[in-house]
């Protein structure tokens, strides 16, 4: 995959771990100062779940990926590698951040939770076609593609135990599955809080179920199924709601599209009556702007919610997901 990723080597990680643990007094984490048990999450979607489930329990949740940092490109500092070994629980999503995967593999954390094992992963590429198109109103006939059409060699295997797409949190139903699994893992680590964790998880799953219903209802009557995005992170969302995702590049936000792919996207936009090319807040929007300028399309934001920053259209997962729904409704002509 054509992605720029700066990874710590196994030797560097081992050395960083030794450095971090050997100089604990010089760079001790906040968890050492307040004495709280510590959960370390790899990036925002895992951090959000952990905080929602833990709630008011006296457990600290820290994240390795700070706001505004593109998760795929995360570089771990020695102190962060040390935090992984000191944590009671590490929550990560294997396949999304190779530097984290390697560091977790060498850490001495008591509980290592790979969110990819808490639900089923699917393979998605630059083109992802949902299969449930029944009941949708489209502007013309002959709209649906045969499965695999337009892919043109742009299939990207991306992470996970079986080469699956890791962006499961963009499907509220799958995110709820991960929440349920994480609840069990956290209850094993902190059994005294089991009842509170279960109560919080039930409340979170109820909210995610409601969000799923909002997407289903909001996207029901639409004029097109197709949306174009720079970062093909929305395969699970497309699959869940019967949409066709066309990524300018692949599942990685830094994979560059070939001229042939851009030409293909232009043809798809015209054929499918697409009005908008979506870009995102943490990655380059150069590809989206190029396609929009060449085709006369509008640009908009569809956020993969890999992090929350001051450019995010909301302060948390639910707010940004609802902003995504509003953007999709407008782009797809949903009524």
Image (tube, grey):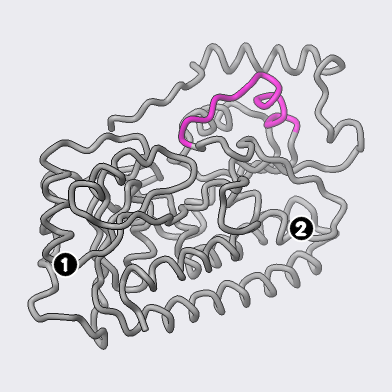
Q: Quadrant of the C terminus?
A: bottom left
Position in image of residue 240 (x %, y %): 37, 70
Position in image of residue 110 (x %, y %): 70, 39
Residue contact at pointers 1 and 2, CB within 8 angstroms: no
Q: Which residue extends farthest left?
A: 142
Q: Quadrant of the N terminus?
A: top left
Q: Which mark is residue 54?
A: 2
Position in image of residue 186 (x %, y %): 71, 54
Q: On the picture, is 284 further left or further right than 314?
A: left
Q: CA distance from mark 1 to mark 2?
A: 45 Å
Residue 173 vertical position relative to residue 184 in the rendered view, above or below: below
Q: Is residue 235 magenta?
A: no
Q: On the picture, is 62 further left or further right than 182?
A: right
Q: Which residue extends farthest right?
A: 34
Residue at image location 26% in from the left, 77% down from the top: 132
Density class for disc 2 (Cα within 10 Å; few <14, some 14-19, many ≥20) is many
Residue at image location 41% in from the left, 59% down from the top: 120
Q: Quadrant of residue 228?
A: bottom left
Q: Secondary structure at mark 2?
A: helix
Residue 219 vertical position relative to residue 307 in the rendered view, above or below: below
Residue annotated with mark 1: 272
Residue at image location 75% in from the left, 31% down from the top: 86
Residue at image location 43% in from the left, 84% down from the top: 217
Q: On the picture, is 11 further left or further right than 269?
A: right
Q: Quadrant of residue 185?
A: bottom right
Q: Camera-side residue: 159 or 136? A: 136
Q: Nearer the viewer, mark 1 or mark 2?
A: 1
Which segment is the magenta one? 72-86
Q: Camera-side residue: 18 or 237? A: 237
């Amino acid at each position: 995959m054509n992605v720029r990723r700066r990874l710590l080597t196994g030797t560097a990680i081992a050395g960083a771990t030794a450095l971090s643990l050997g100089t604990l007094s010089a760079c001790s984490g906040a968890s050492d100062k307040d004495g709280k048990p510590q959960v370390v999450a790899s990036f925002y979607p895992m951090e959000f779940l952990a905080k929602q489930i833990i709630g008011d329990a006296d457990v600290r949740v820290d994240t390795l990926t700070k706001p505004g940092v593109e998760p795929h490109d995360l570089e771990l500092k020695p102190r962060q590698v040390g935090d992984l070994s000191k944590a009671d629980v590490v929550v990560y999503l294997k396949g999304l951040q190779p530097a984290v995967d390697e560091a977790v593999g060498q850490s001495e954390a008591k509980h290592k939770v790979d969110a990819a094992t808490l639900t089923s992963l699917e393979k998605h590429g630059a083109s992802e076609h949902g299969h449930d198109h029944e009941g949708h109103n489209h502007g013309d006939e002959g709209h649906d593609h045969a499965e695999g059409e337009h892919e043109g060699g742009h299939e990207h295997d991306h992470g996970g135990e079986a080469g699956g797409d890791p962006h499961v949190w963009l499907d509220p139903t799958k995110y709820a599955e991960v929440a349920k699994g994480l609840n069990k893992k956290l209850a094993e680590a902190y059994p005294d809080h089991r009842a509170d964790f279960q109560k919080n998880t039930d409340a979170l799953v109820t909210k995610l179920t409601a969000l799923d219903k909002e997407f289903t209802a909001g996207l029901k009557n639409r004029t097109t199924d197709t949306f174009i995005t720079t970062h093909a992170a929305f395969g699970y969302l497309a699959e869940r709601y019967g949409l066709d995702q066309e990524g300018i590049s692949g599942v990685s936000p830094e994979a560059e599209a070939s001229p042939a792919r851009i030409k293909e996207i232009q043809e798809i936009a015209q054929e499918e009556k697409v009005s908008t090319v979506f870009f995102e807040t943490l990655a380059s929007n150069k590809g989206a702007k190029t396609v929009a300028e060449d085709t006369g399309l509008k640009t908009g934001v569809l956020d993969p919610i890999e992090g929350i920053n001051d450019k995010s259209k909301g302060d948390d997962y639910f707010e940004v997901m609802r902003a995504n729904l509003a953007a999709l409704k407008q782009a797809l002509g949903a009524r």
